Structures are given as structure tokens and as C-alpha cells.
Image: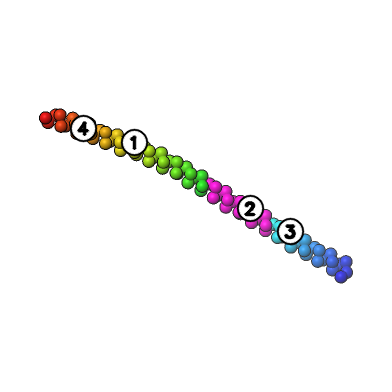
Amino acid sequence: MTDNQFDKLYKHMTKRFDSLHNEIVDVKSEVRGIYNHLDEIRELLDTDEIERGAQSIQLARHKKAISDHDKKLTILLKNRTA
């Protein structure tokens, strides 16, 4: 192999490796973006779970309050008609 052939081969291989390196960098960037979106979704789900838990507790309190008021009104109505 002559020096000229070697230089051509070296330049060609350098271009290919640079191209592959750039592709790898692009893929890593895309994967990082996917991970970031997954993290955002996870955070939204965590927040949603917390909010649903709070709503469930609030609903239970409201149901108890309504039940208590119903009992009191029933007693008042019975005393009123008696």
C-alpha cells in the first residue's frame, strides 16, 4: 500500500468515524429527551396520585358531615312532629 492510498483510506475512515460519532451523539440526545419526558410524566402521575388522595379524604369528610346532618335533621323532625 502506498502512502497516497493509505492517506486516502485514513481520510475515508476518519470521515466515517466522525459521521458515526455524530450519529451516536444525536441518538444519545434523543434518548436523554425521552428520559426527560418520562420523568415529567412520572412527576405528573405522582402529583395526580397525591391530589386524588386528598380529594378522597375530603370526600369522606363531606360524606360524614352530610350523614351527621341527616341524623340531626331526622331527630329534629321527629321531635317537631311529636
Q: Return the mark for residue 38.
A: none
Q: Return the mark for residue 18.
A: 3
Q: Return the mark for residue 29.
A: 2
Residue 50 picture quarter? top left
Residue shown at 74% from the left, 60% from the top: 17
Q: How far apart are labels 1 and 4 at the CA level? A: 18 Å
Residue 72 picture quarter? top left
Q: Nearer the viewer, residue 50 or 9?
A: 50
Which region is colored magenta?
Answer: 23-40
- Depth check, mark 4 against mark 3: the one in front is 4
Q: Amino acid at mark 2?
A: Ser
Q: How far apart are labels 2 and 4 at the CA level? A: 65 Å
Q: Nearer the viewer, residue 74 or 18?
A: 74
- Residue that extends furthest to the left in the rendered view of this protein: 82
Reading the chain from its start, which is encountered first: label 1 or label 4?
Answer: 1
- Depth check, mark 1 against mark 2: the one in front is 1
Q: Amino acid at mark 4?
A: Leu
Circle 3/circle 2 CB separation < 8 Å: no
Element type where label 1 sits in the image: helix
Q: Amino acid at mark 3?
A: Asp
Q: How far apart are labels 1 and 2 at the CA level? A: 48 Å
Residue shown at 84% from the left, 68% from the top: 5
Q: Return the mark for residue 73.
A: 4
For disc 4, the neighbor class at 10 Å (few under 14, some 14 to 19, many from 20) is: few
